């Protein structure tokens, strides 16, 4: 489909930073410090990249300035263009003209609250949201498509212009057609958007 066409002729080179918990605790927030991102980017830079991305949505709750600092550090470390999933999401919403969104995440109340505030500062109003109340990153990846569709369905009729699935560890990318059907909204998925944005920068 679209994703296969999008990635034709593209090679992916991957490393990871350790992320086990998503909450507002100091320990959880420290997982997203600039230095681990810089070090990971330096490792990847050895292969001669055209672009690099932090494929995580932490900037949505830690703030856009935080993600811009990560992108800058990665760009210098890998000697290439850099972005993040959150910056990709903002670009996607703006380029599509979406100012009112419904939000689906696996996160807890406090994290969702920060996301809504940070999106508002960027001119994107969250008019409906559904979340699972999870903090364990591994558990995010265990959420099935039926449960994600259930969250999306509860955002139908909200007056949103798009449904934003915000988490690169939720398995929604292969189910956007179902999500669009149950919500009645175009879907912006973090994983798909991150890949498209990284290829375009």
Image (tube, grey):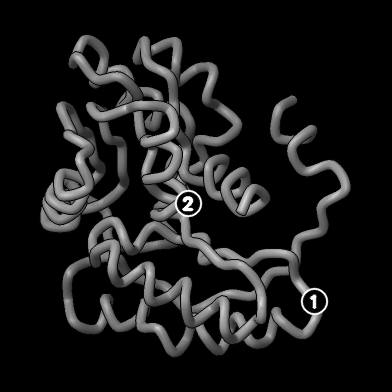
Query: Mark 1 or mark 2: which is in front?
Result: 1
Identify the residue at horizontal 54%, vertical 17% (top origin). 177
Quadrant showing the C terminus:
bottom right
Image position of 67 with respect to 11: above or below: below
Quadrant showing the N terminus:
top right
Identify the residue at horizontal 21%, vertical 10% (top origin). 157
Residue that numbered label 1 is attached to: 48
Residue that numbered label 2 is attached to: 168
Q: Please provide percent x and percent y for residue 93.
A: 38, 35
Question: In which image quadrant can residue 95 be found?
Answer: top left
Image position of 60 with respect to 41: above or below: above
Q: Nearer the viewer, residue 172 or 36?
A: 36
Q: Extreme right residue here?
A: 9
Identify the residue at horizontal 71%, vertical 81% (top origin). 45
Identify the residue at horizontal 25%, vertical 43% (top origin). 132
Image position of 14 with respect to 91: above or below: below
- On screen, residue 94 versus residue 125, left or right, reads right
Badge 1 density bin: few <14, some 14–19, many ≥20, Cα 10 Å: few
Question: In which image quadrant can residue 62 be found?
Answer: bottom left
Q: Please provide percent x and percent y for residue 131.
A: 24, 40
Across the whole image, how many numbered discs are drawn on residues? 2
* SS category of the residue bearing label 1: loop
Q: Please provide percent x and percent y for residue 90.
A: 37, 45
């Amino acid at each position: 489909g679209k994703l296969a066409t999008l990635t034709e002729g593209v090679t992916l080179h991957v490393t990871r930073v350790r992320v086990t918990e998503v909450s507002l605790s100091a320990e959880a927030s420290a997982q997203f410090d600039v230095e681990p991102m810089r070090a990971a980017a330096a490792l990847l830079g050895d292969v001669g990249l055209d672009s690099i991305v932090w494929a995580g949505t932490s900037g949505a709750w830690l703030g856009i300035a935080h993600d811009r600092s990560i992108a800058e550090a990665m760009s210098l470390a890998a000697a290439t263009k850099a972005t993040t999933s959150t910056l990709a999401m903002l670009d996607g919403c703006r380029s599509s003209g979406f100012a009112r969104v419904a939000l689906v995440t696996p996160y807890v109340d406090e994290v969702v609250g920060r996301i809504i505030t940070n999106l508002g500062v960027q001119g994107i109003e969250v008019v409906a949201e559904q979340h699972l109340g999870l903090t364990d990153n591994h558990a995010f990846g265990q959420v099935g498509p039926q449960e994600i569709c259930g969250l999306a369905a509860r955002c139908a009729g909200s007056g949103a212009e798009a449904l934003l699935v915000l988490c690169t560890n939720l398995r929604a990318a292969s189910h956007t057609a179902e999500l669009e059907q149950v919500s009645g909204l175009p879907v912006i998925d973090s994983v798909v958007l991150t890949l498209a944005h990284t290829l375009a920068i």
